[in-house]
Amino acid sequence: MHLLNRTAGRISRHRRRPIAGALLLLLGLLTAGALYTAVLSPANAAKTQSDTELAEQGRKLFLVGCSTCHGTNGEGVTTLRGNQLGPSLVGVGAAAVDFQVGTGRMPMAQAGAQAPSKPEAYDQDEIDALAAYVASLGPGPAVPNSSDYSLDNMTDEAQEAAIVRGGQIFLTNCTACHNFEGSGGAMPEGGSAPKIRGVEPKYIYEALLTGPSNMPSFSNGNLTPEEKRDVIAYLGSLNDSADYGGFGMGGLGPVAEGLIAWVGGIGILVGFAIWIAAHTTRTNKKKVQA
Amino acid sequence: MSIDTSKVATSNKGAATPDKPNKVGAVASWADERLGLGTAMKKQIRKVFPDHWSFMLGEVALWSFIVLLLTGVFLTLWFHPSMAEVTYDGSYSRLRGVEMSDAMASTLHISFDVRGGLLMRQMHHWAAMIFIAAMMIHLLRVYFTGAFRKPRELNWVIGSLLLLLGTLEGFTGYSLPDDLLSGTGIRAADGFMKSMPLVGTYMSFLLFGGEFPGDSIIPRLYTVHVLLIPGILLALIGAHMLLLVFHKHTQWPGPGRTEENVVGFPLMPVYMAKAGGFFFIVFGVTALMGGLLGINPIWKYGPYDPTKVTAGSQPDWYMGWPDGALRIMPGWEFHFWGHTFAFNVFLPIIVLPGLMFTILMLLPFLESWITGDKREHHLLERPRNAPTRTALMVSLMTFYGLLWAAGGNDIIAIKFGMSINAITHFMRVAVFVGPAIAFFIARRWCISLQRHDEETLLHGYETGIIMRSPEGGYSEKHLPISESRAYTLTARDRDEVYVPGEETDQNGIPTPGGRLAGLRAKLSTLWYADNIQKPTAAELEEAHHHAEHEHALQAAGEGYPADGHQFDDFGGTHETSEQPLRGGH
């Protein structure tokens, strides 16, 4: 007690202004806050969690948000009539979860031809947890690393060659549904192959791996990881390059062009015809009735 | 013999002196003295054309054709019509090292390595789209105003041929670059040909020089595109315009305008300036579109490869409607003795366009046969005054438009979030029901407008002034229309229903065409049924009499607002400044 009093007394001896106490308090709070954020916060706790704990956290989220359609154990739900409410998730892998939930397709707002992309309902930590849980149900494709689809460690020539290869693979495998520049296309019964320009490379890679909705899955035996990387590089290069011909009208092909020719071209020219007919060649600008 | 000169003017002192010679005149005289064109041109450059905006739609087609010729010649200087395999080594890095035909490689060369090449390509493509669209709106104008009637039926046929050839020209041009879209189009055309029973396969092998794709289709289409069809187009455009000069231009009815004259301005200088200016406007609009709007980005389609196809593979718009018919056709295919008859392809793409073009060319003859009208017509008819004719074209347009939409069913599906199957099922019914509904609505609409015209003629126009009689009844005041407007409204013929003659002549021998005469009379009755005829002079007289009587009755109330209406000055019928305002403000 004596020591404590002496220490306090020593501090108080150094006290020059009354505000110093408040500053000291603030410093102490900041230190405690920083320590908490760095070591003790729940987000960080998740990082240091074991996979089992992550999967357990994901299971809790799954039971709330996904189990109505996919079953409490991810086994899928079949209605009495034999319709599938949600498919079994055994073996779809973390990549499928990361794609479906990360692009907002899951959870679905309503049953329909296919799940449309919308604002995501979960943040990335929650998606990781869900993915870890679903991955624990059975072996499946994992979430790819950015090194899987990045050309960064290649020479310029090798990058260019990869883009050329990717373009040809894209035109062979993807354009039939997704259109020649990835603007999307129609699928039977209200489905559609979505626009894939501007989609994050990770999600394109995951879609290729897992084949969501009507899309076939391009497994590594079908398209090697390098070929997937090249396709992604080609799409990225389309995003980066200028539209050489001018405004591309949505990249939809001749339908949009025909619409512009009629509404724009013919519309403007007929307008000019009306304008010319309304004026004489005389300089006083007054219409002379013939 | 002495000459009485007392009446000769004395003010003329000396001989007349010519104007100070100018340079243009000197050049003209130099040329005229050697070529003698002045005499030949004197009549033509003073030719009179009537003024109306709708008469300039054909001009849009003509000028865009000139743009096509100019830009097309530019493109031929670098285009290689060859299917030889080459490895692309140009500026577009995303296709460098890819194997492709020389045609595709040279089109890429024009797009990326020839100065102004991409602009020329895009201008050529936009001008082609506008050329055919302009021909179609010109056709509609001619039809809706009755300008196809005698003596212009053959010019209508020539115009229809121009539309057909323009479409074929467009298709061959679409096919030349040998990109993915071109190749898909040629592949489809190959299938169309092969759907023809018996001769189809032979025709396809003849055209492709063997099985598709072979290596001669591009050079052959090139010859057709730059030589054969443009040659025929030029000749037909020449004939079309010579006939226009020979027939003289039609005009809208109005005071001073008859079947025997043309009222308007001379070609030189008025229409030289207007038409010349319009050419530059068409050129300018095409250049702007070519410069600002990317069309057919072949570098994205990549070279044609039969194993590839892209979503959104459509023909250019003018081939869209048969493509739509093909898309909604049920898959009816028959097999006879080991042969397949692809009726699902043959009907929509071979039979239907052939039938539609035949109907189009026969329209003038069909109408004159039904109505029995063999007179010359140089005055135009308003669409409302020929309700059945107007409705017929509206019905054909609806058919065309629905098939057009069906041709873009996939784009409609993704852009409006609809099911492509639902669109297809809807269109299968709509292409039959839609034109029928459109016919009915258009016809009744025309007749309603005729009724309105009759009303205006007999009772005058609606002034918007409401009159109240001393008994308390309300009525709207009508005022007579101007003389010239009344003339314009009545400058049309009364419809005459065709009455068949005797079925046999006096010797009891059936008259030629006697059997059809009954059908013709029925059709003629239907053609004119419910039309409103213009009022007779007596009816007009009586109506005017009646109107005068009414005006006399209303005269007492003129200028006096009814009780309680002192303050709402809508028609400017009275001055509010003299009225005291409420509350003495």
Image: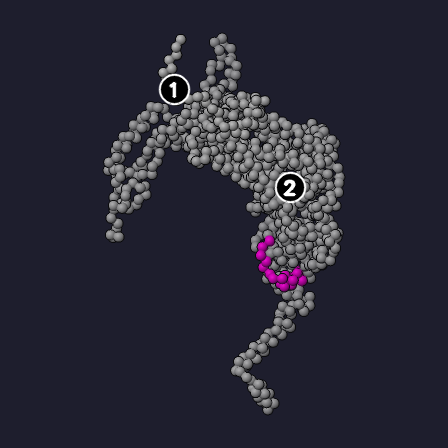
Q: Chain of mark 2?
A: B
The reply to whether callout 1 and callout 2 are in contact (CB within 8 Å) is no
Question: Do the residues at pointers 1 and 2 share their chain?
Answer: yes
Between B256 and B375, the one lying in front of the other is B256
Label 1 CA crowd tier, 10 Å (few <14, some 14–19, many 20+):
few
Q: Which residue is mark 1?
A: B9
Q: Residue furthest front?
A: B14
Q: Relative to A91, does residue B475 appear above or below in the rendering?
A: above
**Mark sitting earlier along the chain (1/2):** 1
Q: Secondary structure at mark 1?
A: loop
Residue type, label 1: Ala
Mark 1 or 2, which is nearer the eye? Answer: 1
Q: Residue at x 68, y 47 (%)?
A: A174
User: How many numbered marks appear?
Assistant: 2
- In 3D space, how far apart are the residues under numbered discs 1 and 2 (Cα atoms)? 67 Å
Between A193 and B344, the one lying in front of the other is A193
Q: Relative to B111, does residue B216 appear above or below in the rendering?
A: above
Q: Residue at x 65, y 58 (%)?
A: A98
Q: Which residue is mark 2?
A: B116
| Magenta region, residue range | A117-134
Q: Chain of mark 1?
A: B
Residue type, label 2: Gly
